[in-house]
Image: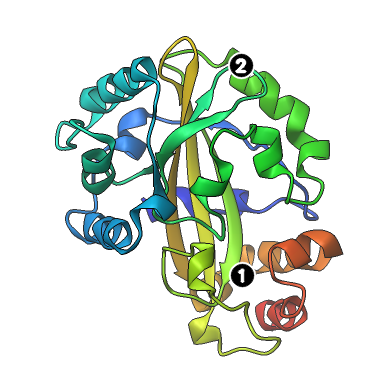
Amino acid sequence: MLGRVLTEKLFSPGQFRFSLGIGSVEPADFFRNVEEKRLLELRRQAMESSVSDYLQAIRDEGIWSAVQDFVNGLEPGADTTSIDNLARSWEPDFVILDRVAPHLVRGGCVCFPSGWSLREKIDKSLFLTHAPVPGLNDDLGANISKLLSRIEAGQFFQRMNWGLTGGAELDQHPRHKIPAIAPVADPQGVYLRIEWQVLTAISVGALLFGIRVFHVPVEEVKASPALASRLARNLETMPDAVAQYKRLDQCRGWLVKYLWQ
């Protein structure tokens, strides 16, 4: 699966910018369990450590029924008898949103968040959940809302997002207080963190937002001149406010030099 997301298209050409970067995807490629026991064991560990930090129940019975039908049609190995069982037996993280604006967050399970908490997002609009990201709503808010309102059942749209982290853990919930990358760090402890995101409608009123997370050692990125140069250029041209939000403001000078060497 990593080969599908680690491409030059992950980074903006020329300079950093927020982009929807939407493309189509075959649902089975994303929603089927493919990692055998490793990923599910990590999900169970997260759930057992603090279930309310990762799972928020879907209170609307109609929406929950739509989730069950959707998962049963794609991954027969998942247990849909409860959202807790589903979270422990299905590999992707998932969030349920209202299809109509303001796209309230209705529930889901996110065991591998990139520095955010699902519990803090529940019953808030998508625009409020994106509010901490400097410039994102201004640049893409209207286009995101238009896409979410028009997506049909049977359509599956994918996009990629990236960051950099000094923690090897897939679970980067704020409660773990994973430190930012040091201004000068050991490259062996730095990872490109990729979010592969897929969005689809599961009913007339509900959307399912799926997330898979991958870590790639920055040393492997550097070994590919095309990837290294694109990442370096994106870091160089990233607005200061975005770099601070991504916790890269202190380390990006070192990272750029490392990638260009």
Q: In the figure, 229 relative to 160: above or below?
A: below
Q: Which residue is mark 1?
A: 225
Q: Residues within 10 Å of mark 2 (few under 14, many from 20)?
A: some
Query: In this view of the protein, which residue sits in the foreground, 54 or 31?
Result: 54
Q: Residue furthest top?
A: 204
Q: Which mark is residue 211?
A: none
Q: Residue at x 44, y 35 (%)?
A: 107
For image coordinates 76% across by 65% down, the residue present is: 243
Q: Nearer the viewer, residue 14 or 137?
A: 137
**Horizontal side, residue 187 vs residue 89: left or right:** right
Could you say which quadrant of the image residue 147 lies in?
top right
The spot of residue 141 in percent (x, y) is 75, 32
- Identify whether 111 is placed above or below 228: above
Q: Which of the two discs, 2 and 1, sits closer to the camera?
A: 2
Q: Amino acid at mark 2?
A: Val
Please tell me which residue is depicted at 80% across the width and 55% down the height of the picture. Answer: 15
Visible residue check, residue 116:
yes
Pinpoint residue 39: horizontal percent, then vertical percent.
Answer: 27, 57
30 sits to left or right of 209: left
Nearer to the camera, 237 or 140: 140
Dot 1 alpha-carbon crowd within 10 angstroms: few under 14, some 14 to 19, many 20 or more:
few
> Which picture quadrant has residue 121?
top right
Q: Find residue 165 and report its image quarter.
A: bottom right
Q: Disc 2 and disc 1: Cα gap in Å?
A: 43 Å
Residue hosting label 2: 100
Secondary-structure class at tag 1: helix
Q: Nearer the viewer, residue 201 or 96?
A: 96
Residue drawn where x is 77% and y is 55% of the image: 16
Residue at disc 2, secondary structure? loop
Residue 200, image x and y in percent? 46, 24
